[in-house]
Image (cartoon, rainbow, N blue to C red):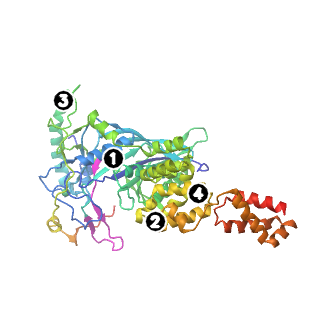
Amino acid sequence: MSLTADQVRWVAHLARLELSEADLAKLTEQLSAIVDYVGQLQSVNTDGVEPLAHPLPIHNVFREDEPHVPLPVEAALANAPDRHGGFYGVPAVLD
Amino acid sequence: MADLPYRIVIGLEVHVQLLTKTKLFCGCPNRFGLPPNSATCPVCIGMPGVLPVMNRRAFELALKAALALNCQIAAFTKWDRKNYYYPDLPKNYQISQYDLPFSYDGWLEISTATGPKRVRIIRVHLEEDAGKMLHDEQGGGRDSLVDLNRAGTPLLEIVSHPDMSTPEEAKAYLEEIRLMLRELEVSDCEMQEGSLRCDANVNIHVPLAGGGHAATPIVEVKNLNSFRSVERAIRYEAQRQYEEFQKTGKKLGEVPKATAGWDENRGITVVQRRKEEASDYRYFPEPDLVPVEVDDAWRERIRASLGELPAQQRRRLQEQYGLSAYDANVLTSQGRAMVAYFETVSGKCGDPKAACNWITNKLLAVAKTQGSGNGGPFALPAEHLADLIAEQKAMGLTKQISEELFDLMVGEGLTAKEAIERKGIKPVASADELLAIVRRAIAANPKAVADFKKGKTAAAQAIKGAVMKETKGTAKPDLVQQLVMDELQKV
Ligand SMILES: [Zn+2]
């Protein structure tokens, strides 16, 4: 397998996911399979090929600095699991 | 600073919010102080299926700032996703720039105690800001609150080389950025409101007995909310690293880079955690935005709009008007409008030094005590100040009388001529007239004359005072002095 359990544990930590040891073993296998699959691209010789920044051959798409009407506060907060007045409420974060 | 047993090495990462009407990728208002979550839309709160579109004005303001910072402008630039999970980032990634920033390799000239110094700029890139978190500091364990009004507003990140070696230089660099970007109307750079933010990368070089030096591990100091806290935090952190180095001997590269928070109340830095490495952010190209190409014409059009920048202004004020470096800096630091005001006064009265003195000693003091209301320092039109300076010379007015006239002009909105009339000041037409007044004063003060004759030279002051009173201060003090002494000798 191309990934170790520790690597997957670290990526899970970065995504703020808590994994059981059983899930960790399963995901390590599955993620390894994905990485290996994509890894086949490594066998292509890309010498002298410009890295592709975007698949579309267009650039400089802008909008003018004109305001639109924002969402009403009630609509913005409609999906929030928790709120305090006009704020979203989230579990205490002490970084 | 020279007394420290180490050299401080400082690089700054500065974030400035751009003065656009709308956010970077949507039309929501970009304004400080709106009610929480009243300036959001599906794009900036990360709803599925939405697409960002770049704000042209934001990109042009960014170009302006980068050119003012003497940066190279990339002909081709793109945006990337920086992935991390935090409640103030609804998409779970920030649209930023990774390997192809729109500008790089610049420099900013700052004025230091030992003259101008160049601080090199590594890169300037354009990204979106995150929302704002409010933590319940007392309640302990209660919820945190999230306001997404700021999420998606345009933010410029300016990264310097570690070219600053004192806390004062770091402050000067920040002040120069603020002055320049305010004058260019790129940002209002209010540290209190967070439109100018700064993180400092700090380490120290400790000389070794056998020659050379040891470098300590770099710490990134965050939460610097004022110019003063930038200076204090760097000074504190350098000393903390020195003491730690004495204990552990740990050098750069031997421990991971750390971040520290500045605690303003306790006046200390608190080292927090291992900093996430760039690869932990799993950057990849933003597929929802197409790249931007900047051709020569566009770049030069923006460059032509910059006008005279502070460093050029300081130099010109010294060369063209013969001002000292100090005076040139005081005027420049007040902004372009003040420099223009100075040039009008100086041009009209023909005395740059006097114009500068009046502005720095009197006008700025008035502006300070009266605040920015009534036009602030420009409450007195430049032409009127020029007239006052001209009258002061022509009529030989004393400094005190002139300043009283100045106050009257500012207070009542009068011209110099009107103020002179109001105070009833008449010019002393001729030396003959003045001589007559001196003689009258001598005749009217026999006691002072007698004292003078007995050798009390100070008694001459009484005569002089009488003359000044009679002339309402319009006579030149040194001329009066001379006439009084001459006439007393003759008595
Ligand atoms: Zn929006």
Residue B105 visible in the displayed image: yes
Q: Which chain is indicated by disc 1?
A: B
Which region of the structure is painted magenta?
A: B125-146
User: What amino acid does circle 1 point to?
Assistant: Glu
* Up-down relation of residue A21 to residue A29 (above or below): below
Badge 2: residue crowd in 10 Å (few <14, some 14–19, many ≥20): some
Q: Which of labels 2 and 1 is toward the front?
A: 2
Q: Is disc 2's CB within 8 Å of ligand 1?
A: no
- Tag 4 residue: B392
Residue B265 is covered by the magenta coloring: no
CA separation in Å, label 1 and label 3: 28 Å
User: What amino acid does circle 2 point to?
Assistant: Gly
* Residue B241 appears left or right of A31: right
Q: Which of labels 1 and 3 is toward the front?
A: 1
CA separation in Å, label 2 and label 1: 62 Å
Total residue callouts:
4
Residue B461 visible in the displayed image: no
| Residue at the outermost bottom position | B139
